[in-house]
């Protein structure tokens, strides 16, 4: 047993007269302790016999309230009771030699201020159980042959002291696979010196360093340190220290369970539903490994989507699946005590999530995404229908030849004005009943210079009646500017009205000289194929006399 610390001896006070104490109702502190062996007050040492029970008494001075007495043996508390006189019976073993014993008492003071008895060291006497007589290494029998005149040496050995339970100490806090592990075992005091054997499970360990220590009465103890490399095959096996002396039939042993920590294997991402389908909910992926290590690893994820499961971080719960999730990268990393201590990153390969979805269409004109495009008659138009999807779609402009993703006009005409439909179609072997068809329209507006018509209220009006000349253009856009209405007779210009309001000219009380050709010029800002802006039309009027 470990040697107890030598307590500080409290000053001894003369006990108060019994009568005075009995008459007082006030508290009275414990002041002295007396340690006795039978009727004898003990000094600083005590001889006892190994294996024989021995009883000591510890008596406190008169106190109020009654004292609490604590016995210490080998540095450990062994007995506590509230009484004025306490007895302690123990059976010493040879290994208790030089161990220390004492008692403490306290009442109104705290335990840390307890009064202590004197410290007693044990001298444990061991009876000779047998004597061995040897001639060298040979046990002597009833007859010993000697040679006249030749000296002979015999040895006589008193009784052996058998090994008792050793103590085992773990010198490595965390046992990481591949690290060197150390345990220390200290044998009891024996005669002769003990033999120490180390085992891991049933395997005998050989990398052992032993140090002998000498004690009184020819007793010896051994400190043994074993070193070995931690391996997962040794996880939770028993590390055992066995001690014995030659001829001892029973082994004395101490043991400890040994956990070994190792890293997880490289994970991979698993899922039974790949590929997913857009619109699905409640889906998840898993960071799977053939060995999650010890302790069992947790996972961290590198991804834009999903949330680790609160109960098992190796599961990643995905949000409602959309086209944005498709082909998004994801990785997982397994972590445990081993990877943290060693600074390891054990990661899966990058995986691309697979989500099948209906095609998404972009219509591009001049490199820009549009739903409507405007061209002037005579210009070129090239519209490209781009479609992305999983599975990959096939793209066509409906009703157009040749088929394909490009709608093209080299010399667009007003008759090409209208809506054109791009259709993207895909087929899935995983989801054959799902509709993987998307259509988008392109509105093509074709602007052109107007065709101008001149309408008159009458081509053969009678004199003195009103003649109305009206300019009526037809083009796209329909926002017209009327430049002029010109009245001519043959090649002679009779009159010219600039910017006529709404393209109308009225002639009040028409006369014969108002006969002739009326020419209207108008535009809508679009030039014709010959790049001319103003477009014209005409009509002829013949005024009749009365």
Image (cartoon, grey):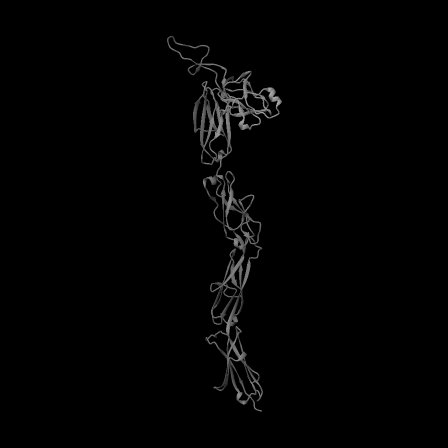
**Toward the viewer: 20 or 103?**
20
Where's residue 492, x and y in %?
Answer: 48, 87
Which quarter of the rendered picture does the C terminus lie within? bottom right
Q: Residue furthest left?
A: 149
**Toward the viewer: 204 or 253?**
253
Where's residue 439, x and y in %?
Answer: 55, 61
Where's residue 136, x and y in %?
Answer: 42, 15
Q: Total label count?
A: 0
- The quarter of the picture where residue 103 lies is top right
Name the residue located 43 percent from the left edge and 10 percent from the top edge: 144
- The quarter of the picture where residue 90 lies is top right
Q: Residue furthest bottom?
A: 546
Q: Residue furthest top?
A: 148
**Toward the viewer: 47 or 308?**
47
Query: Looking at the picture, does residue 3 appear above or below residue 520?
Result: above
Query: Looking at the picture, does residue 323 appear above or below residue 91?
Result: below
Where's residue 341, x and y in %?
Answer: 46, 39
Name the residue located 44 percent from the left edge and 31 percent from the top edge: 227
Query: Looking at the picture, does residue 255 appear above or below residue 298?
Result: above
């Amino acid at each position: 047993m470990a040697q107890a610390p030598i307590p500080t001896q409290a000053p001894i006070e003369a006990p108060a007269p019994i009568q005075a104490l009995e008459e007082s109702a006030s508290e009275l502190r414990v002041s002295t302790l007396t340690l006795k062996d039978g009727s004898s007050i003990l000094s600083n040492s005590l001889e006892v016999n190994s294996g024989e029970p021995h009883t000591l008494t510890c008596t406190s001075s008169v106190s109020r309230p009654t004292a609490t007495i604590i016995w210490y043996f080998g540095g450990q508390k062994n007995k506590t009771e509230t009484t004025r006189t306490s007895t302690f019976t123990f059976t010493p073993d040879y290994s208790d030699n030089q161990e220390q014993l004492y008692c403490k008492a306290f009442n109104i003071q705290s335990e840390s201020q307890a009064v202590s008895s004197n410290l007693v060291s044990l001298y444990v006497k061991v009876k000779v159980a047998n004597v061995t007589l040897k001639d060298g290494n040979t046990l002597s029998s009833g007859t010993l042959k000697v040679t006249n005149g030749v000296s002979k040496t015999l040895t006589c050995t008193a009784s052996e002291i058998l090994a008792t339970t050793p103590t085992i100490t773990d010198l490595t806090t965390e046992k990481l696979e591949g690290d060197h592990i150390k345990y220390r075992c200290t044998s009891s005091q024996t005669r002769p010196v003990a033999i120490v054997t180390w085992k891991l499970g049933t395997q005998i360990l050989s990398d052992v360093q032993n140090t002998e220590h000498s004690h009184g009465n020819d007793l010896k103890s051994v400190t043994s340190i074993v070193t070995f490399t931690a391996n997962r095959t040794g996880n939770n096996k028993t590390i055992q220290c066995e001690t014995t002396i030659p001829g001892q039939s029973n082994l004395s042993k101490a043991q400890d369970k040994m956990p070994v920590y190792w890293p997880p294997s490289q994970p991979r991402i698993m899922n039974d539903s790949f590929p997913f389908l857009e619109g699905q909910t409640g889906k998840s992926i898993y960071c799977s490994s053939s060995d999650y290590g010890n302790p069992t690893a947790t996972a961290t994820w590198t991804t834009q989507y999903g949330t680790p499961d609160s109960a098992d971080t190796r599961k990643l719960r995905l949000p409602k699946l959309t086209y944005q999730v498709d082909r998004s990268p994801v990785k997982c990393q397994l972590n445990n005590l081993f990877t943290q201590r060693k600074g390891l990153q054990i990661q899966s390969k990058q995986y691309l999530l697979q989500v099948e979805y209906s095609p998404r269409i972009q219509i591009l004109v001049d490199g820009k995404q549009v739903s409507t495009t405007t061209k002037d008659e005579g210009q070129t138009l090239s519209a490209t229908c781009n479609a992305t999807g999983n599975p990959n779609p096939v793209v066509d402009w409906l009703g157009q030849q040749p088929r394909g993703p490009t709608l093209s006009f080299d010399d667009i005409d007003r008759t090409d004005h209208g809506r054109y439909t791009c259709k993207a179609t895909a087929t899935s072997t995983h989801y054959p009943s799902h509709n993987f068809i998307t259509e988008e329209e392109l509105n093509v507006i074709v602007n052109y210079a107007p065709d101008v018509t001149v309408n008159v209220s009458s081509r053969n009006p009678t004199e003195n009646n009103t003649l109305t000349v009206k300019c009526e253009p037809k083009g796209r856009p329909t926002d017209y500017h009327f430049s002029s209405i010109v009245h001519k007779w043959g090649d002679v210009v009779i009159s010219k009205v600039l910017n006529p309001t709404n393209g109308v000219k009225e002639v009040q009380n028409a006369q014969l000289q108002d006969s002739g050709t009326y020419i209207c010029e108008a535009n809508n800002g679009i030039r014709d194929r010959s790049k001319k802006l103003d477009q014209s039309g005409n009509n002829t009027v013949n005024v009749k006399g009365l």
